[in-house]
Image (spheres, rainbow, N blue to C red):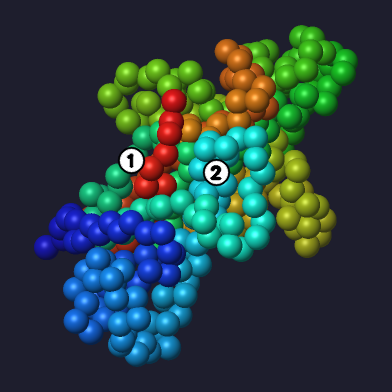
Amino acid sequence: QQEAKIIKDITVKFDNPEEGARLLLQKFNILANSNNCNNEEDEKKNPEMQRPELTMQQQETLEHLTNVLSYFQNIASAYHHSRINPETTTPTSTSKQQQLRSRCQARIVSTIGPIGTKCPRWHADHVPVRLVMSIIGPGCEFVPHEMEVLLLREHKEQTTPRLERIDDVHDSVNVSVDSGKEGDCPVNGIATRVIDRSALNNLKEEDTRIANDLILPPERVDLANRKSMQLLPHDLLNDENGDLRGIDAVESTGNSRHSNVIKRATEGDVVLLMGRGWEDRSESNDDDENKNVVLAAVHRSPALEMGQHRVLLTVDLDYWDYE
């Protein structure tokens, strides 16, 4: 009988990425504990305590996880340092960098079934930055900044009013631009992002499917996908005879990953998501919806089937100041 359940949910806090990786693997019984060492405090009190010899596979696993945690800590420490002392640049010496390393926490959750789909609705995290990696199973779905503002950027280069036509082999979309203002775009004549940020922030709709279509309107996604298809290299858009492929044909070749607005991380991909605590507000005002301002990454969990196994790693700052 198929089931849906949480198998393990482990969280560790770390200053040293290698120690954090080792503790995670020990708690998942992938690595054995040091002799006579039963917890993190014992590790700290006895740093030179003899540790069991690792197999090659265990050593490679430890090194890879250490690199992932270190990668996040380096990025997060830059944020943390800028908040503590915004007028001072981050020191470059190794000793100074070690002093400024921020305490982080890593969490690994192992699940079976749909219970592993933690956040099926499009959302942005209320943190400065978060690392997400699916160790087993599908990764998260997200919209990169360059895809979110694709329609804005297209018309940012316009200097005169004109009628533009976006074509593909099956369909065409007429795009009317009523003025030469910077930021005009082809969605009802109003400058807009692919993501409806007002819906993202204020939506009270309980039905996740409806909410997702309001936050990421299908007509905007379709238009942006068609535009991004036009930007693909010639060899991806054309077949061996030089004829233009249709959208369906490009998707069948696997090259749609270059153009899709919605990106889907695969097993083992490390995804670093900027949260609301680290949004680029240098040019921000009440009209962010219509500007090429870098805002928090919008993402969601993948859909999982009954019996499908997923092991998810997330890494956050242990403490941060968000206003």
Residue hosting label 2: 81
Neighbourhood count class around disc 2 (C-alpha, 10 Å): few under 14, some 14–19, many 20 upward? some
Q: Quadrant of the N terminus?
A: bottom left
Q: CA distance from mark 2 to mark 1?
A: 30 Å
Instruction: Please state which amino acid type lies under the numbered disc 1.
Output: Cys
Instruction: Please state which amino acid type lies under the numbered disc 2.
Output: His
- Residue 280: quarter of image: top right
Name the spot of residue 56 as percent of width and height, x first. 42, 88
Q: Secondary structure at mark 2?
A: helix
**Horizontal side of residue 251 vs 307, given as left or right:** right
Q: Residue at x 52, y 56 (%)?
A: 99
Q: Is residue 188 above or below residue 305?
A: above
Name the spot of residue 214 as percent of width and height, x first. 44, 23
- Residue 22: quarter of image: bottom left
Residue nearest the viewer, comparing 37 with 58? 37
Res. 322 mark: none
